[in-house]
Structure formats: structure tokens, C-alpha cells
Amino acid sequence: MTVSETYTAIGDAIRRQYGTTDKYSLLDMPKMIDSLQINNLIDEGQFYDTTKGDSGDKFLNGLDIATLQKYVGKTLLISFDINWSGYQNTSLINNRTGIEYGIKFKNSPELWFSAWLYPDSSSGTKHVCVFYKLPNDDVTGIEEGNYYNQLNGEAVVKATNLKIVVDPLGGSAA
């Protein structure tokens, strides 16, 4: 594919997303791409922050059976950004923090849809993301749907940018 063909394809995709027929210059494309919105399947603005009183588990709003049913057979990405400090690996059970859902299906096994951080240092910053392909089956229930902090009690945890989104490229299913 030539450079011209590549930019034509990008321009066509941008026009489809915005519903326009305008011609865009190469200089317009970064601005147009940056303005596209990704549909987060959970409510925007949710976070987990031990400095603001969060502890243990915190229910996440927005994901329900009807929403999941729209995406059966699709690959979803679950992700978050995290900063932590004061973590000490003093136990085999208190060593992770993250998002977890149990998704039940009519004919398929339950899927534990989760993204976890297992700290490898006392403090740090990471982006955690995991792909899951939903079975092409009726969704019958959701369990949990929480952000969990299972790190030792001294750890400070700030998780932001919590997202569940459809991967338009199909991702690499876990």
C-alpha cells in the first residue's frame, strides 16, 4: 500500500466516523483522530483511591446484562491506570488489585473477566489491560463487578481511567 493509499483510507475512515464528506488534509488528521470518542461500557469518571477513603472492594457502575448482550462474540478490553506506594509482599493472598466481573452465559462456562495488578515493587505506576473474547452465547447474569484492593493494609492505591471497551481490531483474546 502506498503512502497516498494509506492516507486515503485513514481519511475515508474519519469521514465515516464523523458522517461528513469533507476532504481533510494530513494536518487535520491528528486533530480528528484525537477528537474521536471511545465508548466505555462502564460509567466514566470512576476511580479507586485509598487516600479518599476507598478500601476493600468498590462496586463499579454502568455494565449490565443488556449492554454485554450487545457484544457477545466480540473482544473486549478491560483496563486501568494505577499508582501505588507502600506495598510490601507479606502474604500469599494480599498481593493484587484490580477489576473483576463474573459473566454467566446460557450454554458457555462462566467467564471471570478481570484485570489485575500484581505489584513487583513497593511503588510504581502502570497501565493494566487484558483482552477477553466473549462467547457467542446469551448473557444470563453478572457477578461482582467491583474494583478490588487486596494489597496489604499499608499500601496506597490510586486507580483511574477504568475502562471496558470493544476492541475494533478483535485483539488477542485471553
Image (cartoon, rainbow, N blue to C red):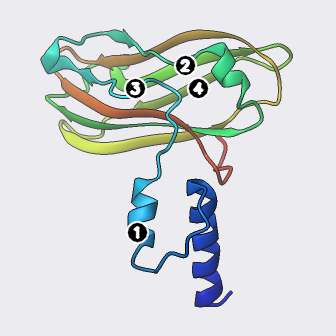
Q: Residue at x 64, y 90 (%)?
A: 2
Element assignment for label 4: strand
Looking at the image, do the residues carrying marks 1 and 2 touch, with CB atoms under 8 Å apart? no
Q: Mark 4 and 2 residues: CB-CB less than 8 Å, in contact?
A: no
Q: Residue at x 55, y 19 (%)?
A: 63
> Which numbered marker is on residue 98?
3
Q: Find residue 55 and report its horizontal and vertical position in percent.
A: 25, 11
Q: Where 38 falls versus 14 (above or below)? A: above
Location of residue 41 with respect to 153 vertically, above or below: below
In the rendered structure, are the residues bearing label 3 and label 2 in contact, judged by CB atoms less than 8 Å apart?
no
- How far separated are the C-alphas under marks 4 and 3? 11 Å
Q: Disc 3 versus disc 2: distance between alpha carbons?
A: 16 Å
Residue designated by label 1: 30
Which label sits in the foreground, 3 or 1?
1
SS category of the residue bearing label 3: strand
Q: Residue drawn 58% across and 71% down? A: 10
Q: Is residue 118 visible?
A: no
If you read the primary sequence from the N terminus, does the residue marked by circle 1 or circle 2 appear first? Answer: 1
Write the residue at 23% across / 29% down. 158
**Residue indicated by mark 4:** 113
Residue 115 spot, x, y in % from top left: 48, 32
Which secondary structure, mark 2?
loop
3 vs 2, front mark:
2
For the residues labelled 1 and 2, the Cα–Cα distance comes to: 31 Å
The residue identified by callout 2 is: 63
Gap between marks 3 and 1 measured at Cα: 32 Å
